[in-house]
Amino acid sequence: EAVRLVEGVLGGALVPGGGAASAEVERWLAGLRSGEVKTAVARAAEMLKGWLEAVKGGRYADYSSGRAVRICAEGVCAVKTRGWTIYFRPVKVEARSGEVKERWIVARSPEELEAWLSRAGSAYVAPALFFTGGGAELRVVAVSEAVVDEVRRRLEAVRGASGVQYDALTASARRGVLTAAKVGDVARLWKAYIDGVESYLTDPAKREELRREAERWIRALRLNTTAEEAVARGLEMLKALRDSGLFDALRSMAQRLGEVGVESVEKMLEALEGGEFRLEATPTGKMIRICGEECVSVDQRGVYTMALEGLSAEVQIPRLLPEEYAKRLHIGWLASDESREPHGFALMYTTQLWQLYAWLITKPGKIRILIQNVVLRRGGASIELTAFPRDLRLISGGSTLSVAESGRAIYQMPLEGRDIKTSTIRLVLKHLDAGDPLPLVAYYLGDGAVERGNLVISVSRKRMHLFEGRGDISVDLKRKMVVFRLAPKLYAKAVAEMYLSGVGVLLDVLHSHKWFAFKRLAAGSLAGFQLTGRYVKLSLAKGLQGKVPFKTREEAERYAEAAWRELEKLGIDSAPKVVRRGPSYDVVFDEKTLRKLAEVDEAVKLAIERLEALSTPRTAAKPIIATRLGAKPERPIKPKIEARHEELPRPVEPKAAAKREELPRPKTATPKAVDRVVFQLVDGLASMKLRLTYVMKEGKKLPTINAVARFSALEEAEEFRRRLRLSGINASVVSRGGGGFEVVVPKDELEKLAPEEKEAVKRYLEHAAQTGDEERRKAAEEALRRLDLGAKAVNIGGVRLGLVHKKGKGLRAEKYGDPQLIAEIKTALEDKLREMLGHEFEQWREHIQITEGGRRLVITRQLLQRLAQRDPNTAKTLQQHEKA
């Protein structure tokens, strides 16, 4: 097909006077001023002939994939996506002046290209023949050198693999997208997430964590179920997904991706460094591709993706939800991340692994999952997944969209016009108006944007009109998003349905950041009530309080007066205060007022109950103290009716507030110096924070102690880890998502510290045992009991080597590791010994031995005894070890 098209074009078409295509070339040559571009356009016919001869002779490279055909030879590539385009080798045009805002252009005329080049910096320019409407049109693709350099920079940043460990569940809970530092780390990152999710099926402690979270909401919403039943339903769905082979399929794909991704990045970098790359573009210029054997795409939003091939899996998902319930969730997914391809298959694109699980529970049947792109982010690499059900079709006919499973229509949706998204968004709003918020929850899980205090959904400009004119939605055209203001009863119904079905528990397991955000919004909405036309938000941060915010003092005072009158009608002789908070003002209701109001208003009573339920165990409510309830509010606003326009009393000044008697608070915070340990390294001192945590061993949850140091950049964390390892202390680097990276030293390595250094660890655990709650106290006592405070290693100038007894050889010091690390430690150790022993060092050099193929470093008993004579600390360590 490509040969036939080129033969038709070369039938005199690119030769002056040879036809319509020739006229195109002459038009370009007449209007171009740039010599490099003129030369490239003029050589098009010659290069095309060379391509044709090479292809006919079988001398071509086939870079075709499942998404495009690419047949390349002699610096020319014939590419077919939807239609055919012939791309010629790019040439570089040096900077003329300035830097153009547009990073690329697909110019249709020489004037358009020259105008772009006149404002641009250096750029790469390539002629291209687009076959459209039965003819060939010559256009020129021009890409700024800055874009090519950015592609190179991002590829170099993610090339290879690192030794980073990932806290994938925490990363998912914070941002949703799982981003690996290097493309080769993707397998480890995915495995960490899948293992973390799967552990909820076997770990009793994690099951208890789910039970406590479900119980908070069941109590707050007064649901007719138990937390155990809700958790069982959620874990049953999780087990069904695991038994379907989904977990193993994703692990296998990730492992293959780690290998293919590293290879693809190297090939692409090789093409860029050798200048052997091509430029491609969509006909409209909305996206460009920079291609070698692989292709990196850049779209108008600045998203850089590298295409991958051959990574797919197929699983059979059982029916996990009732049909009607799945339909309501499906409406929300179809309004957001799900789309319909031309043959009627439903498609799901996502970079968030938790979304795949959440979407699959609504799609029973055979599911095909593909990894098509690596997203090259500034901070690493993430993966774009595509999934589609083979047994499910979306069939549009007239005014109806039918969802068919294996040829059987299982349900239908009303369809307005040809735009399915518009129709399903209208359907989401229709369900919401009817009091059904479940489709909106799925819509938020797809297109929602996590924003503090607001239920925000991203919407394209062409669909923004669907939300205009509604009292419960604000439209932000500039940011292309809408803000929903849901009534508390809708939040309550949404969360209740999610937990009653078990889907809420499943999303808790998946650590869905959007689900966590939705629950935070629901908790804020439910912990409040209406009074005098305004919403009073309750809080336990400083005892039970209710607050209503205002921008100006005048507004706050008017509301305080109206609220006081309403309270008087209810027989409550109390008034709210106006308190300044930065540039705004709060009307504050104290605990005494709220408790009395709860006695006469069921809505207030319910709001307080919900607040206390949802604040446990995360935020414990302060106890109600009789003296505080009986105390009169300080300087309340209680204006007389006839003096409503007079100035109300000012809020309490800080000095006056300081005179109030403060309630005693238990001092549970760890003193600043207690939670840190300082120890010697080979090149100086290291200070790390101590952390009491847990570790799973043989199915048991055991308390332990770690030392951690946090860094914002991976390079800094890796450098600190290198210093620790060079000093004989093993450590790992753990990604904390948006929180940066942690270097973690486990308990076994902390036990290598000198006894005097381990005193800091002992003090920390003793402090935790005395000041923590019951669970923390027991954990600290157990960790302290299991901590070896004796001398397990010798410190030679900051290098720590474990002390061992070998039969027939007595005491000696050893370090086992990979040969490269052992060689580095040996070099550092020799430098330290040279300083300590001076001219004696050469006679003791043979007592520093490397065995087992370079993997074990040994210091003999004789050298240890000599060091003990020179260094009192070494002598003390050896004596303590001998006693033990």
Image (tube, rainbow, N blue to C red):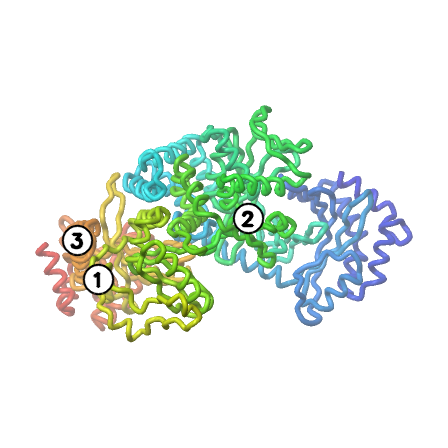
In front here: 104 or 644? 644
Labels 3 and 1: the sequence-earlier one = 1
Mark 2 closeness class: few <14, some 14–19, many ≥20 residues within 10 Å: many
Inspect this view and state whether residue 186 appears.
Answer: yes
Give left or right: position of 394 versus 532: right
Q: Secondary structure at mark 2?
A: helix
Q: Pointer 3: what residue? A: 784
Give left or right: position of 173 versus 466: left
Where 429 sits versus 527, above or below? above
Mark 3 closeness class: few <14, some 14–19, many ≥20 residues within 10 Å: many
Q: Secondary structure at mark 1?
A: loop
Callout 3 amino acid: Leu
Picture coordinates of residue 554 (x, y %)? 45, 69
Labels 3 and 2: the sequence-earlier one = 2
Q: Pointer 1: what residue? A: 665
Where 686 sits versus 127, above or below? below
Q: Pointer 2: what residue? A: 264
Picture coordinates of residue 833 (x, y %)? 24, 67
Q: Give the residue at the far left of this rendering.
A: 883
Q: Considering the image in quadrants, where does the N terminus appear?
A: top right
Q: Considering the image in quadrants, where does the C terminus appear?
A: bottom left
- Report how far apart the C-alphas of labels 1 and 2 lie in the structure: 59 Å
In front here: 862 or 725? 725
